[in-house]
């Protein structure tokens, strides 16, 4: 497992954050390198758990999927058992351990309100060790982790990489990546978002022509989010803070637009209820997080911070199981909770 990253590593990761499925030849031109060098460097990063490209159903583009955040108050001594169970659930995309009474924070997905309600009201509360839960439905995801950038490239190279063609056209269509014939491709791309049609054909046992057509449907429909992840403990920003904020509805869009300019921003989601905006940041230090709170409350007024949670450890992020430095150690495909509808 890698312990440190070089500047060239950060540059390659930044480029893949911008264009996760770009060919090595195209990236080499933009980064003034060679395809062989980039491919070797990337393989080293993947094998060392330091970076990876993943894919999962595009929540914002698929109205069938409902996201929620679940805070769990756990019985003493049973947190580890709960984590071992929840980390295997495809519907639990992320698991964080926080420094507060509700010490587990989950990001979960369901197909519509019925399936999500079953997950929130029955499946999770019935687990041994769960004392209480607080659930927050995400009415809109303004910003998510695929938008975060490591910030290693200068403006010229960012522009060069950004001009490379994206994975898909972004035109919504009736493609459900959790169902046949797309589910096996979604799972395989979740494990490695850079897999080619030939790779996917070999894994799924389907003809290359069939996979190429199905992959084209997934990409053109914008049905998957592709994300280049990095082990957070190897970055200059190891501190995660969730801010539960209250903003008058008329001011939400203005606050979100102003938040987007902050390079520490990782996530912004609108929620129903008193705390109607969840803001997640990756910070360099606790001191910087305090300055961030000051900015939120003073620079973004009338926004007010109702609560905050310092994340001590991220156990799972968008299906990837992580060690204490945030390096990848395993994968569970992220799929929304759904009943058998046959």
Image (tube, rainbow, N blue to C red):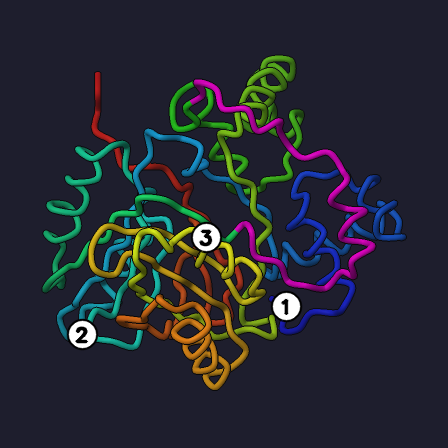
**Where does residue 317 sit, x and y in percent of width and height?**
43, 55
Question: In the rendering, which numbered label is found on residue 2?
Answer: 1
Q: Quadrant of the C terminus?
A: top left
**Dot placed on the residue nearer the N-terminal end, 1 or 3:** 1
In the displayed structure, does residue 165 sit left or right of residue 326?
A: right
Disc 1 to disc 2, how far (Cα)? 31 Å
**Residue at horizontal 49 percent and vertical 60 percent from the top:** 266
Disc 3 to disc 2, how far (Cα)? 24 Å
Mark 1 against mark 3, which lies toward the viewer?
A: 3
Q: Quadrant of the N terminus?
A: bottom right
Viewer-proximal residue among 238 and 334: 238
Would you name the residue on which mark 2 appears?
A: 77
Mark 3 against mark 2, which lies toward the viewer?
A: 3
**Residue at horizontal 56 percent and vertical 65 percent from the top:** 262
Q: Residues within 10 Å of mark 1 (few under 14, many from 20)?
A: some
**Dot placed on the residue nearer the N-terminal end, 3 or 2:** 2
Question: In the rendering, which numbered label is found on residue 20?
Answer: none
Label 2 sits on a secondary structure element that is loop
**Dot placed on the residue nearer the N-terminal end, 1 or 2:** 1
In the displayed structure, does residue 239 sit left or right of residue 140?
A: right
Give the magenta part as a residue range. Answer: 146-175
**Where does residue 86 sit, x and y in percent of width and height?**
27, 53
**Residue at horizontal 88 percent and vertical 48 percent from the top:** 34
Label 1 sits on a secondary structure element that is loop
**Where does residue 51 sit, x and y in percent of width and height?**
61, 57
Q: Residues within 10 Å of mark 2 (few under 14, many from 20)?
A: few
Q: Residues within 10 Å of mark 3 (few under 14, many from 20)?
A: many
Would you name the residue on which mark 3 appears?
A: 320
Q: How many marks?
A: 3
Asked if the magenta segment contains residue 214, the reply would be no
Label 3 sits on a secondary structure element that is strand
């Amino acid at each position: 497992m890698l312990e440190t990253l070089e500047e060239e590593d950060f540059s390659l990761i930044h480029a893949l954050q911008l264009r996760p499925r770009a060919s090595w030849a195209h990236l080499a031109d933009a980064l003034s390198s060679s395809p062989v060098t980039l491919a070797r460097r990337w393989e080293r990063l993947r094998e060392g758990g330091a970076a990876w490209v993943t894919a999962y159903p595009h929540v914002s583009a698929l109205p069938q999927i409902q996201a929620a955040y679940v805070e769990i108050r756990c019985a003493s001594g049973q947190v580890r058992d709960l984590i071992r169970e929840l980390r295997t659930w495809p519907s639990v995309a992320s698991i964080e351990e926080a420094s507060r009474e509700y010490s587990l924070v989950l990001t979960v997905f369901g197909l519509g309100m019925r399936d999500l309600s079953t997950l929130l009201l029955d499946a999770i509360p019935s687990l041994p060790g769960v004392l209480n839960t607080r659930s927050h439905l995400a009415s809109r995801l303004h910003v998510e982790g695929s938008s975060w950038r490591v910030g290693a490239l200068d403006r010229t190279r960012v522009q060069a990489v950004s001009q490379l063609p994206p994975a898909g056209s972004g035109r919504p269509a009736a493609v459900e990546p959790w169902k046949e014939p797309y589910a096996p491709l979604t799972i395989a791309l979740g494990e490695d978002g850079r897999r080619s049609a030939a790779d996917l054909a070999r894994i799924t046992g389907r003809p290359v022509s069939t996979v190429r057509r199905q992959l084209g449907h997934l990409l053109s429909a914008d049905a998957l989010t592709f994300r280049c992840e990095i082990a957070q403990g190897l970055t200059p920003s190891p501190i995660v803070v969730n801010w539960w904020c209250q903003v008058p509805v008329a001011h939400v869009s203005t606050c979100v637009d102003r938040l987007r300019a902050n390079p520490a921003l990782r996530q912004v989601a609108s929620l129903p209820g008193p705390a109607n905006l969840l803001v997640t940041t990756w910070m360099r230090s606790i001191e910087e997080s305090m300055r961030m709170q000051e900015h939120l409350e003073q620079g973004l007024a009338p926004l007010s911070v109702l609560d905050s949670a310092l994340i001590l450890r991220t156990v799972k992020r968008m299906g990837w199981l992580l060690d204490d430095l945030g390096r990848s150690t395993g994968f569970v495909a992220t799929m929304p909770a759904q009943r058998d509808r046959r």
